[in-house]
Structures are given as C-alpha cells and as structure tokens.
Amino acid sequence: MTMKHNHSLIFKIFISLFGIIGSATSFLNCGITGFRGEKSFVRIPVRTETEVVHVSLSTGEVKNLYGVHLGFANIVREGHAGIQVGGANISNGDTYATTQVALYNTSKQTRFALQTGGMNEVEGGAGIQVGLYNKEQKGIFAVQTGAVNTAESSAGIQVGLYNKERKGVFTVQAGGMNSVEESDSGIQLGLYNAKTKDGLYLTVGGVNSGGGGITLGVINSNGGNGLNAGVLYNSGGLGVNVGAINRGKGVNVGLFNRGTGVNVGVVNKGTGFSVGAVNVGGGLSVGAVNIGKLGNFQIGAINICPDGVFPITILINYCYDDSPMQKKETSSTN
C-alpha cells in the first residue's frame, strides 16, 4: 500500500515539474544560431517569432527580441527591448529600450538607448553613448562621451576631442574643438569653439568664433550680441567688447579700439564717443591727442583737424570747413 502511494506521489511530482517546465519554456522563448549564420537551428518554441534569449555563434538574426541577445553579430529586424552584447549589435525596427555593448552599435526608431563600444549610432528618442565615435540623429536628448561626437538633438551633452551639434535648442559641449550649427543656446568649453548662428551662449575657450551671450577667450572673432572678453582680440561683436584689441560695435574697452559706439582705450579709431590717449575719428573725442574729421568735437591737450578751419588747437576744437565750396554744398543741401 505504501509502495503504491509512493509511486503515485512520484508520478504527480513528475507531472507537476513537466508542467512548470513547459510553462516556463513557452514564456522564455529561446534560440541558438549556428556558425553559418542562417536561421536558428534551435528555437523554443519552434515557430516563435519573438525571443527572450538568443545566442548566436556567428550572425544571429531575429524578428523580435525582448530580452538578451548574445553573439558575434546580433540583428533584430522589428521590435526590440533588452540587452545586446557582441562584436556588432544592430536594431533596425522599433527600439523601445536597449543596452548595446559591442565594437559597433546601431539603433533605429529609438525611444531610449545606452550604447558602449567603438562606434555608436542612434536615431530618434534619447540616448547615452560612450565610445570612440558617437552619432545621434533626430533625437530629443543625447549624452555623448568619446573622441568624436556628432548629434542632431533638441538638447544634449557632449564631452570629447571633437563635438558637433546641429539644430539643437540647448547643448553643452566640453572638449578640444566644439561646433554648433543652427542651434539656439548652450555652453561651450574648449580650445576652439565655433557657432554658425547667433544665439544665447556661455563660451569659454582659447579661440572662439561666432555666437552671442557671454564669450570669454584669448581670441574672439565674428562675435555676436553680448559680452565679448578676449585677452588679445575681439572682432565683430555687438555689445561690450573687452580686450587688448577690439573691433566691434557698442562699447569697446582695450588698448586699441576700432569701432562704432563708445571706445575707451589707449588708441581709439572710430565714430562715436572716444576716450583715450590718442583718438582718431568722428563724434566726440576726449584725450591727450585728438585727430578728427569734419563733424568731430574734440577735447584734449592737442586737437588736430586737417580739413577744418582751425587745423590745430589746444583744449577744445570743432572740425568744420568754412570754405566757399563747403558753403555751396551746404546751401545746395538745404
């Protein structure tokens, strides 16, 4: 009696284990691809198009993968969410969330991707990329760390030797060379920083080209609206330019200033209000030596007006021409 009871109990346990294994197998859809790289030679269930675990000995291509993909070359044709680890990882369909680790990683139609490898490419959504070369297209947010980083995202952070952003709203770049095209605002920290469109930026570097906002560097060229402070040279800025040599519009403060607006320096050349040791130009000049043209009001120790009635005066002078030709021109104008 006891023997029969034991046999019955063992049989029930065996049936229960078989049911559990069967249920788990139906849930954990698995596949193994051989060395030739065609279809999976082991697939559980046999006709499944969605796999949770796939291991490839060469090229492993699956239709849908929601889980773990291991192999030399891993390819997902349609839906993907999970982890891919191998020599190359490719997700061509809807990528909901993926982590890819390989020498080459690419993800299309992406919601979120974390990529680590030699070369990383992501399209759409948000991504974090760590590699030698990182590329992001048509995205919302991207974080890139590598030797070369390129992106087309609304917002992003790039850290590398060369960083490039196109069509961004706000971008932070730190590296050797930073470049933004058609972007609105951001922060650039680097040896060379370039911008093709005026915007609102904080730029700190050795050589800075273009921009707007606050630009701090050794040489600033093609400056935008805002504050341009360069140790050696500022060019093209509209706003406040502070440096040894300034060529801009607005307020120029330096050793040599050439521009329109307010010029404060040792030598100033331009039109507007100039205060310095030597002033050359038009408007109002206050300095030790003022050299002006017609219409220039001068206050200084020596005032020179080559074409005026009084070519040289002391303290105060106004450059005007009282010649008959000048009167004729004045009357004809009136």
Image (cartoon, rainbow, N blue to C red):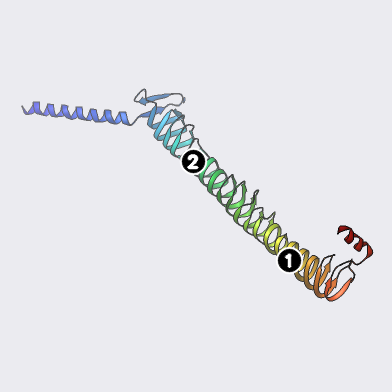
Q: Where's the N terminus, which quadrant?
A: top left
Residue 32 coordinates in the image, percent (x, y): 40, 28
Residue nearest the viewer, comparing 253 with 326 = 326
Q: Residue at x 15, y 29 (%)?
A: 10
Circle 2 or circle 1, nearest the eye: 1
Q: Residue at x 93, y 62 (%)?
A: 325
Residue 192 coordinates in the image, percent (x, y): 64, 53
Disc 2 to disc 1, C-alpha distance: 49 Å
| 231 relative position to 324: left or right | left
Q: Earlier in the sequence, mark 2 or mark 1?
A: 2
Which quadrant of the figure has residue 35? Answer: top left
Residue nearest the viewer, comparing 95 with 22 = 95
User: Which residue in the protein does label 2 denote?
Assistant: 125
Which quadrant of the figure has residue 70? Answer: top left
Q: Residue at x 94, y 64 (%)?
A: 324
User: Which residue in the protein does label 1 denote?
Assistant: 263
